[in-house]
Amino acid sequence: MTGEDDPTELLDYLVERIPIAKTKRGHLNRGPITEVAFDLGGRTFKVQWRKEVLVVVPPVHLTAWVDLLLGRLSDAAAVDADLRRAMLRSGWALR
């Protein structure tokens, strides 16, 4: 990600590429995605829009958060064939 990338596209991209993503949308579950969460190895990774600000859990810089997420996804993909297949189809290298 660069400073010019739109972080809202990140939410759509993650949901589209990762089958274990848990999503929330606006009122009545309509509209754009407002939250994406992943439970990986006993740790929850979450990214959400709050008052036009992107908030990530654990609270680190967005680039570091994506790196942590990909590391945990790689670990989870080692034991989950469906997740491994989804990651490889997305063009992500397993770590």
Image (spheres, rainbow, N blue to C red):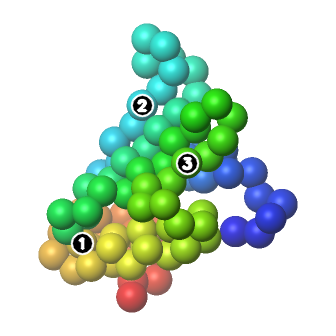
In the rendered image, residue 27, in percent from the top left (x then y), is placed at 49, 13
Front residue of 24 and 53 = 53
Q: Locate the N terminus and report the quarter of the image it occupies.
A: bottom right
Position of 92 with respect to 80 (left or right) is right
Which residue corresponds to mark 3? 55
Between disc 3 and disc 2, the foreground one is: 3
In the rendered image, residue 50, in percent from the top left (x then y), is placed at 58, 34
Q: Is residue 95 visible?
A: yes
Mark 1, other Cα within 10 Å: few <14 / some 14–19 / many ≥20: some
Between disc 2 and disc 1, the foreground one is: 2
Helix, strand or loop at mark 2? strand
Q: Locate the C terminus and report the quarter of the image it occupies.
A: bottom left
The answer to whether 31 is drawn above or below residue 42 in the figure is above
Position of 71 with respect to 62 (left or right) is left
Indicate which disc, 3 or 1, sits on the residue closer to the N terminus: 3
Residue type of the residue flagged with mark 3: Val
Which residue corresponds to mark 1? 76
Q: Is residue 15 visible?
A: no
Position of 38 with respect to 17 (left or right) is left
Give the residue at the far bottom of this rendering: 95
Residue type of the residue flagged with mark 2: Lys
Helix, strand or loop at mark 1? helix
Q: Which mark is residue 24?
A: 2
In 3D space, how far apart are the residues under numbered discs 3 and 2 (Cα atoms)? 14 Å
Q: Which mark is residue 53?
A: none
Front residue of 16 and 70 = 70
In 3D space, how far apart are the residues under numbered discs 2 and 1 (Cα atoms)? 22 Å
Indicate which disc, 2 or 1, sits on the residue closer to the N terminus: 2
